[in-house]
Image: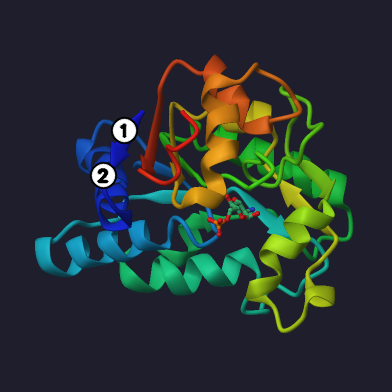
Amino acid sequence: IVIRDDAAAVHALAADIVERCVRAGDHPGGPVLGLATGSTPLGVYRELGRRHREEGLSFARARAFLLDEYVGLPTAHPQSYRSVIRDEFAALVDIDPTAIDGPDGEAEDVPAESARYDRAIAEAGGIDVQLLGIGTDGHIGFNEPGSSLVSRTRVKTLTEQTRRDNARFFDSAEDVPHHVMTQGLGTIGEARHLVLLALGDGKADAVAAAVEGPVSAFCPASVIQLHPRVTVVIDEAAAAGL
Ligand code: GLP
């Protein structure tokens, strides 16, 4: 657990971890990144973009997998997570856009698409570094409270709290989709290194429950306690409950 003074320092440390992975060069098919959305990781992507422009950090060999996606939102919608990662990460670095995969929120057969996605991650050799945010209700990805700790990629229904939290990205609260596809907690746990980021006092309770509470489906993020390699990077405000 690393507590930093401000958001910039949190973002810089997460960028250091991603950079180390990308430069390591010990991944036969290239480094495999797990990318999260929400507002918290955006500063990490901006910092990686800066390092690409100014320090020659290259993502040309990298592949990436998204954590989750809205179901029923057209992929072209600016708030689809595909669009967010394209605009907020891929546009800033030299990653091959065709090397980025995510659950297809427009798939007609959601269970088949979910199974395809888990297979794609496994065939890529698994995820080296998985970035994670945390919801105020303790979700990671879109694994809402009650999610099985060994779940695989699947459809989930958002809680009203999460729909309210995410309404700021949409024109109105009613526009927030009800359904999502998300890597399961079991899927996420297979990544070799988890990097969970949180900023602000609104996350303090969720962070405390995830890190110091019982491992329980009531706080899905608590599953990180079972993982051998997790770095939790938070600011002072998000650490207030520890
Ligand atoms: C969404 C995403 C999560 C993210 C969470 C927190 O629900 N599916 O991956 O962690 O939002 O978002 P923010 O970082 O904006 O607080």
User: Which residue is rendered at x = 28% and y = 43% of the image?
Assistant: 4
User: Which residue is rendered at x = 50% and y = 33% of the image?
Assistant: 241
Quarter where residue 3 is shown: top left
Q: Position of residue 65 (x, y in %)?
A: 53, 49
Q: Position of residue 211 (x, y in %)?
A: 52, 25
Tell me, yes or no, if residue 233 can be seen here.
yes
Q: Which residue is mark 1?
A: 2
- Determine if the C-beta at disc 1 is less than 8 A from ligand 1: no
Q: Which residue is mark 2?
A: 13
Q: Position of residue 135 (x, y in %)?
A: 63, 47
Question: Who is closer to the viewer here, 193 or 32?
Answer: 193
Image mark for residue 25:
none
Question: Who is closer to the viewer here, 44 or 125?
Answer: 44
How far is the residue under mark 1 from the one under mark 2? 9 Å
Q: Position of residue 205 (x, y in %)?
A: 58, 38
Dot 2 alpha-carbon crowd within 10 angstroms: few under 14, some 14 to 19, many 20 or more:
some
Query: Mark 1 vs mark 2: which is more N-terminal?
Result: 1
Give the amino acid type for the residue marked by disc 2 in the picture.
Leu
Furthest-left residue in view?
55
Give the amino acid type for the residue marked by disc 1 in the picture.
Val
Q: Disc count in the image?
A: 2
Q: Secondary structure at mark 2?
A: helix
Dot 1 alpha-carbon crowd within 10 angstroms: few under 14, some 14 to 19, many 20 or more:
few
Relative to 240, 212 lies left or right: right
Q: Secondary structure at mark 1?
A: strand
User: Which residue is rendered at x = 23% and y = 44% of the image?
Assistant: 16
**Quadrant where ligand 1 appears:** bottom right
Is there CB contact under 8 Å for labels 1 and 2?
yes
Tell me, yes or no, if residue 189 can be seen here.
no
Marks 1 and 2: which is nearer the front?
Answer: 1
